[in-house]
Image (spheres, rainbow, N blue to C red):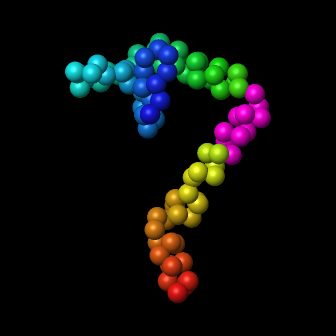
């Protein structure tokens, strides 16, 4: 979950206004607020030095599971375990 300076929360590709603690209502963002959010995100990304962006990208790539498992689930893992025995 990611919250930015204009008070919106970004979660799994969707953007919502922050929820008031006692209220369970979530409101969608207006187009102007969405453009402001996208502009802030874009500027924040390109203000970082190129080396830092590359390092972040490599960390994210290392943290993700292998593509074979991502595409086919546990099936390749189970087959590999059978042949290891």
1 in magenta? no
Percent x, y for residue 21?
A: 27, 21
Single out the residue that lies furthest toward the bottom: 85
Residue 24 position (above or below residue 85):
above
> To which quarter of the image does residue 44 belong?
top right
Image position, residue 29 (x, y; %) = 39, 19
Horizontal side of 3 relative to 68 (left or right) equals left
- Which residue is at 73% across, 39% downward? 54
Whether residue 31 can be seen here: no
Placement of 10 over or under 55, stated as above or below:
above
* Residues rendered magenta in the picture: 49-58
* Quarter of the image with the N terminus in it: top left
Q: Residue at x 52, y 87 (%)?
A: 85
Quadrant of the rendered image containing residue 26: top left
Q: Nearer the viewer, residue 78 or 71?
A: 78
Chief SS of the magenta region: helix
Q: Percent from the top left, x then y, of residue 75?
A: 47, 72
Query: In the rendered structure, does residue 50 fall within the stretch colored magenta?
Result: yes
For image coordinates 72% across by 34% down, the residue present is 52
Q: Is residue 25 left or right of residue 2?
A: left
Position of 22 relative to 60 (above/below): above
Residue 49 point in image, percent of width and height: 75, 28
């Amino acid at each position: 979950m990611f919250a930015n300076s204009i008070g919106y929360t970004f979660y799994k590709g969707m953007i919502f206004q922050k929820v008031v603690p006692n209220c369970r209502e979530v409101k969608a963002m207006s187009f102007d607020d969405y453009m402001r959010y996208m502009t802030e995100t874009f500027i924040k990304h390109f203000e970082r030095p190129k080396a830092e962006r590359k390092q972040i990208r490599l960390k994210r790539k290392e943290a993700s599971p292998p593509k074979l498992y991502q595409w086919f689930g546990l099936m390749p893992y189970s087959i590999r375990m059978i042949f290891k025995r």
